[in-house]
Image: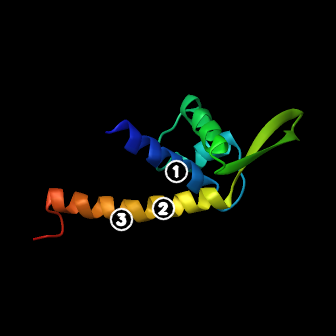
């Protein structure tokens, strides 16, 4: 799979994981697990990249004596997620054409 396409898909997965409310890394991994297998070493660079792009915000809070980072989606992140959904519909249409699914 094209690395840029995969990167965009993983970014969308992370944004979707927090679209209904803030979350932290381990919880996001658990939430995504039924759909996509993602490791911590893959997740955290994505989170940093999305934070740098102002698609999410980060706050730190203590939990059980340890600091935990909580991530929340921004309006820019929501817009990026909506863009992905629109683009995905086009990709699905192209896929159906290439595979001839639904054209019989």
Foreground of the two, 76 or 103? 76
Mark found first going from the N terminus, 3 or 1? 1
Task: Please report whichever mark, 2 or 1, sits nearer to the chain's N-terminal start.
Answer: 1
In the rendered view, does 8 fall on the left or right side of 62? left
Q: Could you tell whether 13 is left or right of 76 in the image?
A: left
Q: Residue furthest top?
A: 41
Give left or right: position of 59 versus 97: right
Residue 81: image tag: none
Question: Would you name the residue on which mark 2 appears?
Answer: 83
User: In this figure, what is the number of numbered marks?
Assistant: 3
Residue 100 in the image, given as x and y percentages of width and height: 14, 62
Residue 79 position (above or below residue 45): below
**CA–CA distance in space, label 3 to label 1:** 16 Å
Coordinates of residue 33 in the picture (x, y in percent): 52, 45
Q: Nearer the viewer, mark 2 or mark 3?
A: 2
Reading the image, the residue beneath label 1 is 13
| Lower sequence index among marks 2 and 3 | 2
Front residue of 103/45: it is 45
Image quadrant in which the C terminus is located: bottom left
- Residue at x 59%, y 33% (from the top left corner): 45
- Residue matched to label 3: 89
Looking at the rendered image, the disc whose residue lies closer to the viewer, 2 or 1, is 2
Question: Disc 3 on helix, strand or loop?
Answer: helix
């Amino acid at each position: 799979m094209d690395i840029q396409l995969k990167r965009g898909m993983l970014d969308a997965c992370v944004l979707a994981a927090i679209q209904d409310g803030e979350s932290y890394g381990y919880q996001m991994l658990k939430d995504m697990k039924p759909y996509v297998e993602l490791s911590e070493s893959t997740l955290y660079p994505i989170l940093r990249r999305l934070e740098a792009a102002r698609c999410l915000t980060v706050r730190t809070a203590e939990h059980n004596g340890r600091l935990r980072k909580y991530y929340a989606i921004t309006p820019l992140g929501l817009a990026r997620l909506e863009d992905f959904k629109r683009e995905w519909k086009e990709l699905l249409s192209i896929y159906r054409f290439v595979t001839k699914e639904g054209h019989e």
